[in-house]
Amino acid sequence: MIRKLLHRAAKVFRPASARPSSSNTVATIPQSRHGIRRELISPGAIRTCEALQRAGHKAYVVGGAVRDLIAGLHPKDFDIATDATPEEVRALFRRSRIIGRRFQIVHVMQGGETLEVSTFRAAHDTDTQKDEHGRVLRDNVWGSQAEDAARRDFTVNALYYDPSNETVLDYHHGVADIQQKTLRMIGEPRTRYREDPVRMLRAVRLAAKLGLEIEPAARTPIREMASLLENIPAARIFDEMLKLLFSGQAIKCLERLRAEGLHHGLLPLLDVILEQPDGARFITLALANTDQRIHAGKPTSPGFLFATLLWKEVLTAWERDKTGDALPIPALYDAMDKVLEQQADTLAITRRITGDIKEIWALQPRFEKRTGKSALRLLEQPRFRAAYDFLLLRAQSGEIPMELADWWTTFQDVDTEQRLAMLLPDTHKKKKRRRSSRSRGSKADETKLAQAAPAEPDQ
Ligand code: ATP
Ligand code: MG
């Protein structure tokens, strides 16, 4: 045991010559060929690279940001790769902290930005800790830059941009692959998927986002290896699903997930939902809406999107439980809990997001009350905007009459006097009494919900 530990400690600083060989040929691509404009790199990323380089280290903007800039897209974040160890990086930046266990990195805060700084990783060898399916469990052995490049998933991601001289170091012909619109795996695809099955989801997402073709050698094994995703922790799948749904190409991503046979077990009910004609329409509308918001630079919320993805299931469960003695509102709460529980095993939706989802769902029946104070009170709900956007989708998909959504569109726009004039008369006394006791029940539940989940800015 002790020998094993000593061996592992020594390995962290193994000289490159002792490690399995990897491609050392690297092309230096000048600005005129890669076309990246320096002013599009975030100031925090440039400052971080410069500080590391001043301290005598290598430092580059790496991965997705370089790839996106060459492809003409705006990167959503900037990652840095360096030969400095996490402790060395930590010592250089006052506002920084080491995070992660399986894959240690340093978060460096620069102004309002957080940069992820990772140390060059060594190639895997027989000592690499893996599970019984070949999945790499720990990954904190430092290596050379060439090894780090070989460890990345796709050629288009193994690119290193040096802000000091504006060149790109390209180890695996990634620049040519971006230009030729090919997503190519570095190394043997089956081995790389076994090491980390999430790469299958990344392949689909990156291909959809950048309009690339997955090369056949990397595409063919996906269908047969899809079940390996079952061994991935739910939280990691959830992160990847978020990236996919908020890539700005959510519809394309989901279509490709289906085409590659990868959608089973991600959202356990996604395949069922997509096969229901009205469900598909609702979800397509919601995803198109999210894609548009992302392209327009507007904020989006995971709670809203997951609320739409799961709504048809809630409706089905609610309809089922509504019969018998159960009152509609408690039955809705039961349905909501059931649907969320079903998802929980595979998809670790965080508690905060679950709170948002429930709030949006719980407000839906209240849109049907267009009488008295209840309509006015609904307008004041912190989550009114998101719940109203959700109502619009329901109307656009044909689930509820458009007239109801239109009424609310006008109601929130006009002044108080006009609002009072719009309220429908409360006709039936008996009905009114029953309604008010129901709404008391639902309000108590909603208060509970509001306390459970602090409201986020609306969509
Ligand atoms: P985006 O940020 O647009 O979602 P990305 O490719 O930058 O895409 P990140 O998760 O930010 O994705 O990863 C940064 C880089 O780390 C990638 O470009 C790639 O080089 C490497 N990388 C990420 N995940 C993996 C993986 N599962 N296997 C190998 N390399 C990976
Ligand atoms: Mg990235």
Image (cartoon, rainbow, N blue to C red):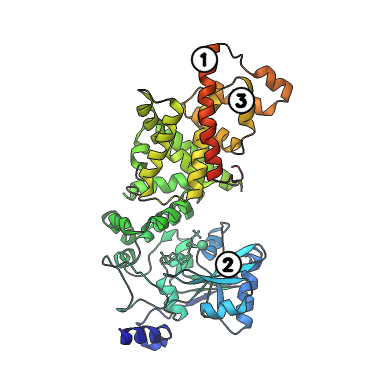
Q: Quadrant of the N terminus?
A: bottom left
Residue type at numbered disc 3? Ala
**Foreground disc of the pair 2, 3:** 3
Q: Secondary structure at mark 3?
A: helix
Q: Residue 274 in the image: x percent, y percent?
A: 37, 38
Foreground: disc 1 or disc 3: 1
* Left or right side of 112 for 349: left
Amino acid carrying mark 2 in the image: Leu
- Residue at position x 43%, y 52% from top? 241
Marks 1, 2: nearer the viewer? 1
Give the labeled residue for mark 2.
Answer: 115
Q: Mark 1: few, some, or many residues within 10 Å (few <14, many ≥20)?
A: few
Residue toward you, 407 or 220: 407
Ligand 2 within 8 A of label 2's CB? no
Q: Amino acid at mark 1?
A: Lys
Q: Is residue 396 visible?
A: no
Q: Which mark is residue 431?
A: 1
- When the figure is inspected, residue 406 is found, relative to residue 75, above or below; the finding is above
The location of residue 44, given as percent across then percent down, is 64, 67
Label 1 close to label 3 by CB (< 8 Å): no
Q: Position of residue 152 (x, y in %)?
A: 42, 69
Closer to the chain start, of discs 2 and 3, is 2
Closest to the observer: 327 or 265? 327
> Which structural element holds mark 2?
strand
| Residue at 50 percent of width and 47 percent of height | 353
Disc 1 under 8 Å from ligand 1? The reply is no
Q: Which residue is mark 3?
A: 375
